[in-house]
Amino acid sequence: MQRSHLGGIIASLVVLVIAGLLVFAYQTRDKNGNNAPITAVGSTALQPLVEAAGEDYQKSHPGTSVTVQGGGSGTGLSQIAQGAVSLGNSDLYAQEKKGINSKNLVDHRVAVVGIMPIVNQEVGVDNLTLEQLTAIFTGKITNWKDVGGNDQKIVLVNRAAGSGTRAAFEKWAMNGATSKEAQEQDSSGMVKSIVKNTPGAISYVAFAYKSSDVTSVKVNGIMPTDENVENGSYPIWSYEHIYTKGQPTADTKSFLEYMQSTAFQKKYVEKLGYIAMNKMQIDRDINGHVTHK
């Protein structure tokens, strides 16, 4: 009888241990979702949109973790090419970035970003041609009076060398010319602040950073507006790319599909200062060839 009783106790303990392990496993699954975390790194211009998508996606997909970091397009492309992250965010095509092996990278366009020149309010200029912008940023024009402004020295403020915004500006505003060496900043927010507070300053930011404390400059007489990007009359803009290494799968695929969905595009894209893909009346390839939809 004692042996039978002892066996019953042992059996009960085994059942309790197994039950405990099952509960722990379930709680762990519920907490972690058995899903690999989604990590996105790169463009600071694209970062706010991906962050908004991540917050929303996590609410509707409990157990999925979405982590978003900046660092610039160059960093995003380098990280995704190495397979170190789930998503590489970029303002430029991967093929445009030197040192990046783009062979296995898959492009997912999620929005369009307009880029506008901004100047300190005291320079006396609100319109520049593409030729004038090129001359200013290459150092050939150094005083605002030479482009119809005040007699004041031009102070250049650039984005950092790895910035996709800078690469897009040099490609579409400067016809591929390289900007003169000048002070560099890692974010559009800091650039705007410096231009606001520095006499004679000029730089460029995404449309999302438009504000009344700096002057938004027309280009070739065309206002930097969403509508003018959409119809092709305003020239300085780029696609917002999210790259994956190979075709995305599982949660990464689902997350990208969510970002490209009509519901997300309507809810967040314009609200955060971007242009929805379905609003574009033109398509532009890597070489600048434009076709109308």
Image (cartoon, rainbow, N blue to C red):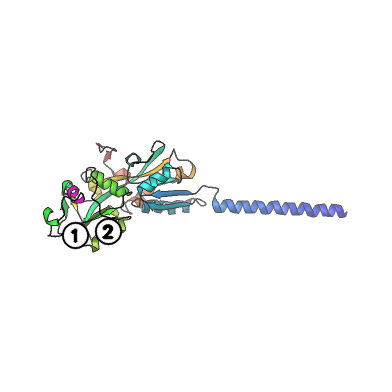
Where residue 264 appears, as percent x and y from the top left, is 38, 49
In magenta segment, residue 128 = no
Task: Please say whether residue 74 is visible from this viewpoint.
Answer: yes
Specify the amino acid type for callout 2. Answer: Lys
Can residue 260 be spotted in the picture?
Answer: no
Q: Residue at x 75, y 54 (%)?
A: 13
What secondary structure is the magenta-colored segment mainly? Answer: helix
Residue beneath disc 2: 192
Q: Where residue 90 sits in the image (x, y, percent)?
A: 35, 46
Q: Which residues are magenta?
A: 133-139
**Residue lying furthest bottom:** 197
Q: Nearer the viewer, residue 108 or 262?
A: 108
Number of the label disc, if any, that sits on residue 200: 1
Left or right of residue 71, residue 65 in this image: right
Who is closer to the viewer here, 55 or 80? Answer: 80
Badges 1 and 2: C-beta atoms under 8 Å apart? Answer: no
Residue 215, x across and y down, in percent: 20, 58
Asked whether, in this view, residue 161 is left or right of residue 147, the answer is right
* Residue 75: x %, y % from top left: 38, 48
Q: Please identify, in this view, whether the residue under mark 1 or under mark 2 is nearer the observer.
A: 1
Q: Mark 1 vs mark 2: which is more N-terminal?
A: 2
Judge from the rendering whether residue 225 lies leftward or rightward of residue 240; answer left or right.
left
Q: How many marks?
A: 2
Q: Is residue 134 located in the magenta-colored stretch of the structure? A: yes
Nearer the observer, 289 or 70: 70
Residue kind at label 1, given as amino acid type: Gly
- Label 2: few (<14), some (14–19) or many (≥20) C-alpha neighbours in 10 Å: many
